[in-house]
Amino acid sequence: MSAFSLPAGRVGTGIVGLGSHQPDNIVSNHDLAKVMDTSDEWIRDRVGIVNRRIAAKDERLVDMAVVAGAKAVADAGLAPSDIGAVIVATCTMPSQIPNAAAQVADRIGVKAAPAFDLNAACAGFCYALGTASDLVRAGTAEHVLVIGAEKLSDWVDQTDRSTAIIFADGAGAAVVGPVAEPGIGPVAWGSAGDLVDMIHVADRNSWIFQEGQSVFRWATTQIAPIAVKAVESAGLTLADIDVFVPHQANLRIIESIAKRLKSLGARDDLKVARDIVESGNTSSASIPLALDHMRAAGEISSGDVALLVGFGAGLSFAGQVVRCP
C-alpha cells in the first residue's frame, strides 16, 4: 500500500499583521436618548459605553472586512498572493449565500484561495484564530488571513434600548503565519448549547434578542476559568500575561473578569482592553479591533503576551494566549 505524502508540519505560528476598520458615523449616548427612553448616565452605568460606530445603509459587512483585511496583509509585509486561506468570522451577513470570505478574498486580491465563513458569534475571532493556527501548523497554508466583521445594525431594533445601546459595526483582522518562536497558544474552547435562548435571532424576520442579566451572570462566573485554562494550555501562568483582551461585551463584565483573574494570580499592572467605551459591542470584530487600537495608542508593545477570550451567543466561548506583533 502506498503511503500518503503529507506536508511537513510547523511548530510555531503567530500573528504577523493586524488591521481594523470602523464606520465614520459615531452615535453617542446623547444621540440615542433623543429616540428612546434612555440617558448617557443610564447607559454608562449599565454597559460602560459612551459612543459606538454604526455603518451607513450602503456600507456592507463585506466592505468593512475588505478594508480591515487589506490593512492586516500590508501590516504583515505581505502581498495578497502570499495569503493561502481567508476566514471571516461573522454572524451578521444579510444572507447565508454567498459567504463573506470568498467576496473579501477576491476584492483584496487573494485569488482562488480557500475562503470560508465561521459563525461562533462573539467567540468567532478566537475560533477562527485557532483554526488558522492549526492550518499553518499542519502545513495546509503558509499564511491565513482571519477577519472578524459584523454589521450588527442590520439585526438590531434601533428603538430597543436593551440592544441598540450595546451593539455596533466594524471589522478587525489578523494574519497568521509561521514564526520561529511560538506566538499562538492552544485554543481553549467549548459551548453551552443548552443556553442558546439567552442570545438569539428567532428567524430571518426578527431582531437580535438578549437576556442581559442572564448573560451577565454567565459571563462573570464561567469565563475566568476558560481564560485560566488557555493560559495553562500555553504552559504559562497568569503572572506571565501582559495584556487581557476579552470580547468587548460590557464594561462591567470586562472589569469583573479582570478582577477575578487578578485574584487568581494576574499582575496588578495587567493591561486590560476597554475598547467597548468608544466602539460598543462589535461581536466577532471586538477582539481584533481592541488589539489593533491598543497597539495604535501605544498601550501594547511587540512581544507582549496577550490573553484573548471570546464569548457569546451559542453559547460559545474560546480563548488563547498570543504574542502581540
Image (cartoon, grey):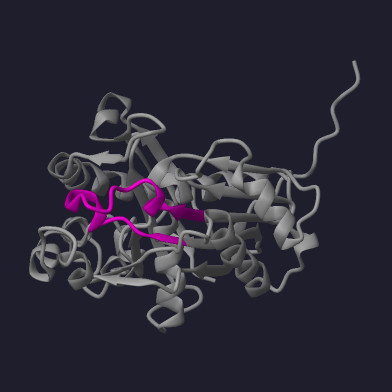
Q: Residue furthest top?
A: 1
* Relative vertical location of residue 16 with respect to residue 136 in this rendering, above or below: below
**Residue 153, quarter of the rendered image:** bottom left
Q: Nearer the viewer, residue 168 or 320?
A: 168
Q: Nearer the viewer, residue 142 or 205?
A: 205
Q: Can residue 226 be seen in this view?
A: yes
* Residue 128 x, y percent position in the rendering: 53, 47
* Relative vertical location of residue 219 with respect to residue 195 in this rendering, above or below: below
Q: Quick check: is 302 in the magenta stretch?
A: no
Quarter that holds the N terminus: top right
Left or right: 120 with respect to 134? left
Q: Which of 254 and 156 is in front in this view?
A: 156
| Count of numbered marks | 0
Q: Quick check: is 152 in the magenta stretch?
A: yes
Residue in the picture at 64% in, 51% down: 11
Residue in the picture at 12% in, 59% down: 46
Magenta segment: 148-170
* Relative vertical location of residue 51 with respect to residue 162 in this rendering, above or below: below
Q: Which residue lies furthest to the right in this view?
A: 2
